[in-house]
Image (cartoon, helix red, strand yellow):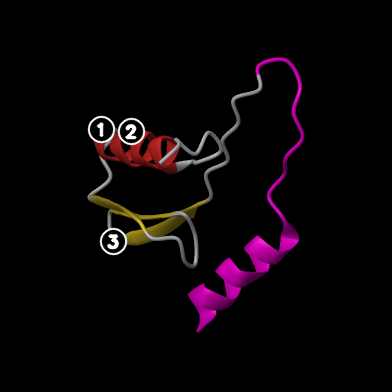
Amino acid sequence: MAENLKSDVAAKEAFRDELLRRGFDAARITGSPADITATKGGETFYFEVKFTRQSASYFGAATLTGGTLLLRARSG
């Protein structure tokens, strides 16, 4: 099977590992309500990870839909 060049799995794993290195108590790749869910000092944090192989120019942005889902998940 061919490698999926658009996959962000390695980026999510690297970010999770960096959060743990920086002292987060736990960090998991969750996918919902966000790519990464982490805890530190009793607080829960949600992270979206974006990845590109482009080095000069690219387009990408977190959407309001994603932010809205996170707010709903926290309040529900």
Residue drawn at the location 77% of the way across and 35% of the way down: 59
Q: Earlier in the sequence, mark 3 or mark 1?
A: 1
Relative to 14, 2 lies left or right: right
Is 51 in the magenta?
no
Which residues make up the magenta segment?
Answer: 55-76
Is 32 on the left or on the right of 50, as rendered?
left
Q: Residues within 10 Å of mark 2 (few under 14, many from 20)?
A: few
Indicate the amino acid at tag 1. Arg
List x then y, in percent, for residue 5. 53, 33
Q: Which image quadrant is residue 20 in?
A: top left
Question: Residue 62 in the image: x percent, y percent?
Answer: 68, 49
| Residue 67 location, quadrant | bottom right
- Residue drawn at 22 percent across, 50 percent down: 25
Farthest left residue? 25
- Of circles 3 and 1, the one toward us is 1
Camera-nearest label, 3 or 2? 2
Q: Label 3, label 1: how many angstroms apart (C-alpha)?
A: 17 Å
The residue that disc 2 covers is 18
Q: Position of residue 4 (x, y in %)?
A: 49, 39
Type of amino acid under label 2:
Glu
Residue 76 placement (x, y as % from top left): 50, 84
Query: Does the magenta run of residues contain 65?
Result: yes
Q: Nearer the viewer, residue 3 or 16?
A: 3
Foreground: 55 or 63?
Answer: 55
- Looking at the image, the residue that sits furthest to the top is 56
57 left or right, relative to 23: right
Q: Residues within 10 Å of mark 1 (few under 14, many from 20)?
A: few
Residue 21 is labelled as: 1
